[in-house]
């Protein structure tokens, strides 16, 4: 039922957005996009994915996991495949957790490994967005820029606060709140060296930087005429919004957010929508290796 609702929301949003542009112009743009820039975008996205795998590998080594880097490559791509192709109750993160438990690791440890990887990745995205918004303040209007800076700053502050929640007895009294206390304990254990935490956040910044290079390459393939500094500020909020699990693989949410944000700098709506569609298709293409790894793992078991 939940996935049917997601499907309906996705269809509703995309239907509305497609009504705002000219169909003929949209398809003409998609078919006439420059192949060399599309190829570069594909390479950039694969690089981003492999660096993300490396981050998860580094974080997992801090726990009890002793698997090879190849294991993490296979599992990460399988997770991406499930996220893009199989909109079921089993998401990509769940697949990664299951892969670790199939190796006889504790389920809680597997959860912590994937959770920390996710949250460090999110902090990297917020950090990149905050730095770009401060460095290129004035690219967007003042109110929007301050909003982005405020959200990024408060979110990073929330992450810092998470490290100290285990100090408050209040969080240990209730089952739900106790989860945050235990997470705080785990984070402090993993990152007793804050230099190591900064290293992993830096890796996350690089991951998202290559994702932005992917988007910028797509913009160049469509002659969108947007500067890279504009992409640095505008795209991270789009990535953040697609985390909200109310549509299938972020479709609709991503396109709507793209149009809304880039409208602030007067970008061509049809080209922006084309860029978002190409990015969604690119994510599908880069997730395809996961289908092979998934089928292969099923044959082994």
Image: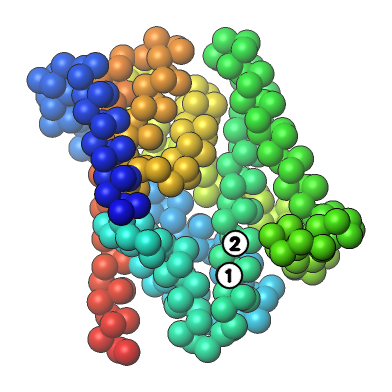
Does the rendering let one see residue 222? no
Mark 2 Cα within 10 Å, few/some/many (few <14, many 20+)? some
Q: Position of residue 218 (x, y in %)?
A: 32, 33
Mark 1 Cα within 10 Å, few/some/many (few <14, many 20+)? some
Instruction: Please tell me which residue lies in front, 32 or 252.
Output: 252
Q: Quadrant of the N terminus?
A: bottom left
Q: Secondary structure at mark 1?
A: helix
Picture quarter containing residue 233?
A: top right
Instruction: Please tell me which residue lies in front, 101 or 43.
Output: 101
Q: Report the disc number at residue 210.
A: none
Vertically, is 155 above or below 63?
above
Q: Identify the residue at horizontal 57%, vertical 78% (top origin).
A: 107
Q: Position of residue 155 (x, y in %)?
A: 68, 39
Q: Position of residue 102 (x, y in %)?
A: 46, 85
Q: Is 213 on the left-hand or right-hand side of 12?
A: right
Instruction: Give the labeled residue for mark 1.
Output: 111
Between marks 1 and 2, how big is the CA–CA gap?
6 Å
Q: Identify the residue at horizontal 52%, vertical 49% (top origin).
A: 207
Vertically, is 266 above or below 62?
above
Q: Report the disc number at residue 115.
A: 2
Q: Are marks 1 and 2 in contact (CB under 8 Å)?
A: yes
Q: Is 31 on the left-hand or right-hand side of 1?
A: left
Q: Is 9 on the left-hand or right-hand side of 94?
A: left
Vertically, is 157 above or below 234?
below
């Amino acid at each position: 039922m939940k996935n049917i609702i997601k499907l309906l929301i996705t269809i509703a949003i995309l239907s509305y957005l497609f009504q705002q542009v000219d169909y003929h112009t949209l398809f003409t743009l998609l078919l006439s996009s420059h192949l060399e820039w599309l190829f570069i975008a594909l390479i950039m996205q694969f690089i981003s994915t492999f660096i993300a795998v490396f981050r998860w590998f580094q974080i997992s080594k801090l726990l009890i996991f002793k698997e090879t880097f190849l294991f993490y490559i296979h599992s990460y791509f399988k997770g991406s495949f499930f996220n893009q192709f199989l909109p079921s109750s089993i998401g990509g993160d769940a697949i990664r957790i299951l892969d670790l438990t199939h190796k006889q690791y504790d389920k809680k440890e597997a959860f912590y490994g994937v959770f920390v990887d996710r949250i460090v990745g999110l902090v990297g995205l917020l950090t990149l967005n905050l730095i770009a918004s401060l460095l290129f303040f004035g690219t967007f209007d003042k109110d929007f820029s301050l909003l982005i800076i405020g959200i990024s700053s408060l979110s990073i502050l929330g992450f810092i606060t998470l490290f100290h929640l285990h100090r408050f007895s209040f969080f240990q009294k209730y089952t739900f709140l106790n989860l945050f206390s235990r997470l705080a304990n785990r984070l402090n254990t993993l990152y007793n060296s804050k230099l190591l935490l900064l290293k992993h956040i830096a890796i996350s910044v690089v991951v998202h930087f290559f994702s932005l290079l992917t988007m910028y390459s797509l913009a160049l393939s469509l002659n969108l005429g947007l500067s890279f500094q504009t992409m640095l500020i505008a795209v991270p909020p789009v990535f953040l919004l697609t985390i909200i699990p109310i549509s299938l693989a972020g479709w609709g949410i991503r396109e709507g957010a793209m149009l809304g944000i880039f409208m602030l700098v007067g970008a061509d709506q049809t080209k922006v929508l084309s860029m978002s569609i190409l990015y969604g298709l690119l994510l599908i293409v880069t997730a395809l290796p996961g289908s092979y790894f998934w089928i292969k793992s099923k044959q082994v078991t």
